[in-house]
Image (spheres, helix red, strand yellow):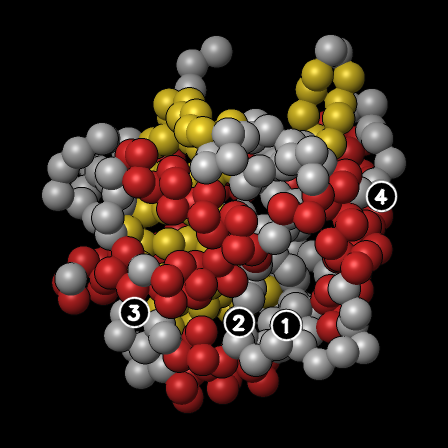
Amino acid sequence: MSYSYRDLFVSASDGLRLYARDYGPLDGGALPVVCLPGLARNSEDFHTLAEALSTDAARQRRVLALDYRGRGRSDWDPDWKHYDIGTELNDVLQILGVVGIESAVFVGTSRGGLITMALNATRPTLVAGAVLNDVGPVIETKGLIRIRNYVGKLPTPRTMQEGARILKELSGDQFPAFGLEQWESMARGTWHERDSSLTLSYDPNLMNPLQALDLEAPMPDLWPLFEGLRPIPVLVIRGENSDLLSAQTLDEMGKRHPNLTAHIVSGQAHAPLLEGPVIQSIKDLIARAESSA
């Protein structure tokens, strides 16, 4: 089987092996793109976007799509308490240091968007532009409860088609626009084949930090992190039916950021697939980042 990407393995600071898909030319003048997935997702979610950006006839560019520790092809951590944003942020910096990326556009889905905001606060020159896919500085409790109810608790399908049916039964009401192709795409990012059977593409212990969350306590104030993005262009993608990023939060984000654009994906919820017209919106954001660099 031929792939459109190179396999990249990097050792984390604690020795864990981390994985990323590395698409496109290794050098050239185009601003690279770094893709950061959601909590229990992985680099598979960015394949369509990464191929579109890395093979763009107008300007090919390097695209890295990362697997956090405990997800995809990265090693599982023997201590689940390391499945936190601070550790994952350091892992991202470790990978980028090894490959020599000093400035990039970051595409962050859900948790990846939070890590993008934290990276900008930690290393402001690193983030030249940001795509926040269905995430913002206010995280709705309803969405967190829904995520906590399924992470690490899904039944194991016998085939990807059965996996697609499981996900449709779980989330079909939120994604009425999805067809079979989209559900199978979601399934490919949820399970993978090992020893002729399917297994989860993440460590089930990811549920432990979620179970430890006190959802009755006030959520941390993330507005300062978001407002740190004011010097750079930002694209916010929101699923029309999202229960994690509210329309009210998105409206307030637009008021607080002078260079923010929004793309609402109809018939989808948390988090929208990065395909179709969304890809053009991301290309437009990258062009804005390059013109202001």
The residue located at (28%, 70%) in the rendering is 232
Separation of residues labelled 2 and 1 (CA atoms): 7 Å
Q: How far is disc 1 from disc 3 in space, using C-alphas? A: 21 Å
Residue at disc 3, secondary structure: loop
Rendered location of residue 23, percent (x, y): 34, 31
Q: Nearer the viewer, residue 158 or 176?
A: 158
Query: What amino acid type is highlighted by mark number 4?
Result: Lys
The answer to whether mark 4 and mark 3 are in CB contact below 8 A is: no
Please report whichever mark, 4 or 2, sits nearer to the chain's N-terminal start: 2
Q: Nearer the viewer, residue 14 or 256?
A: 14
Question: What's under tag 3, amino acid-wise?
Answer: Pro
Q: CA distance from mark 4 to mark 2?
A: 26 Å
Tell whether 110 sits left or right of 293: right
> The residue under label 1 is which amino acid type?
Ile
Q: Nearer the viewer, mark 1 or mark 3?
A: 1
Question: How far across and down, in percent of the image, does residue 17 sit?
Answer: 51, 27
**Labels 4 and 1: the sequence-earlier one:** 1
Circles 4 and 1: CB distance less than 8 Å? no
Residues packed near mark 2 inside 10 Å, few (<14), some (14 to 19) or many (20 plus): many
Q: Secondary structure at mark 4?
A: loop
Q: Residue 259 or 216: which is nearer the viewer?
A: 216
Tell me, for residue 153, which label it has, or none. Answer: 4
Could you tell me which residue is drawn at 81 percent across and 57 percent down? Answer: 211
Q: Report x, y in % for residue 190.
A: 68, 37
Say whether disc 1 or disc 3 marks the residue closer to the N-terminus: 1
Where residue 288 sits, quadrant-wise, is: bottom left
Q: Which SS class for mark 2?
A: loop
Q: Which residue is mark 1?
A: 139
User: For residue 136, which numbered disc appears in the image?
Assistant: 2
Identify the residue position indicated by label 3 in the image: 233
